[in-house]
Amino acid sequence: MTQALRGVVPILATPFDAAGRIEVEALRREVEYLIEAGVHGIGIALASEVLTLNEAERDLVLREVVEQARGRAPIVMNTGAAATDLAVFYTRRAEDLGASAVMVLPPSPAIATGDETVSYYRDIARSTRLPVFMQDVATASVSAALAARIVASTAHTWYIKVETPPTPMRVSEAVSTSDDRLSVFGGAGGAFFVEELRRGAIGTMPGAAIPEAFVEVWRLYQSGQVEQAQAVFARYATLLNLLSQGMGVWTYLYKEVLRLRGVFTNTCVHVRKPATAPDEVAYREIREQVELLGLVSKEVG
């Protein structure tokens, strides 16, 4: 990767049919839709249900995304695993298939000490030329202090995606305790994008539902129009709040937005189990917001 990653890097939703097969054409449409929205990169990660993919499916998704992107956007692939050797294998495979960077969940705190987590990331970084994102999530966090230790453990290009709440405060901590070798992104659906930018984040990795909104907010903020950026983002607050529901509900709802926008069809919005499906009220609430924002495709009606 010749340029540093920054800006809006949405995480793809993976389209599955009723039999659980990946819908390649829908996946390609999603990549094109994101690139047309002006995103600065594309991610394949937890929101892509990557942990439910077998090795052949991981290869298929990454290969198709890289091919469709055709160098127009860098691709970040999640390569975290329960064991260091497996994470190294996934990382090397991602590099072979054309990923521009990798994103790695830490090992479970139930099985790994801080020292072991440092070794895990160090060994992964030494296995690849690609930049490495640490992924800080509530169930397996990477604190600012731990991130600083990881960065100091080996010379490499390091990023961190901050998702442990409260994300604005975690961004501040990561920025203040790191040197110039660690670049900080926000995550968790991008609900606190402006607040994270204010605290020193250089980008965000939201879901794929409304990429153009994040791109516009980024453009305004980078040009010094902070109040305008806040005003634009406020329009999408209710939709982002609805999309933030846990227990797998959000996976269904992101795919529903993509269906309403004409990116996915009715046949490819299935979610791999276990995941709690939304009720009909949740689907109605999502449609109301998408209609209010004028985002429903004419083909969907």
Image: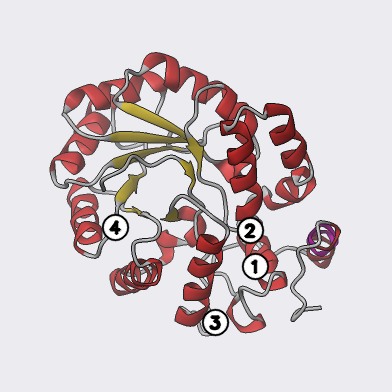
Q: Are marks 3 and 1 in contact (CB under 8 Å)?
A: no
Question: Which residue position holds label 4?
Answer: 99
Say which of marks 3 and 4 sits in front.
4
How many angstroms separate mark 1 from mark 4 (CA)?
24 Å
SS majority, magenta: helix
Position of residue 17 measured from the top left corner of the image (x, y, whole percent): 54, 82
The residues colored magenta run 285-290
How many angstroms separate mark 3 from mark 4 (CA)?
25 Å
Q: Which mark is residue 258?
A: 1
Query: Is residue 287 rendered magenta in the image?
Result: yes
How many angstroms separate mark 2 from mark 1 (CA)?
6 Å
Secondary element type, mark 4 = loop
Mark 3: amino acid: Asp
Left or right: 185 as drawn, with respect to 129: right
Of callouts 2 and 1, which one flags the residue occurring earlier in the amino acid sequence? 2
Question: Which residue position holds label 3?
Answer: 17
Mark 2: amino acid: Ala
Q: Are marks 2 and 1 in contact (CB under 8 Å)?
A: yes
Q: How many marks?
A: 4
Q: Which mark is residue 209?
A: 2
Left or right: 121 as drawn, with respect to 61: left
Residue at 57% across / 42% down in the picture? 188
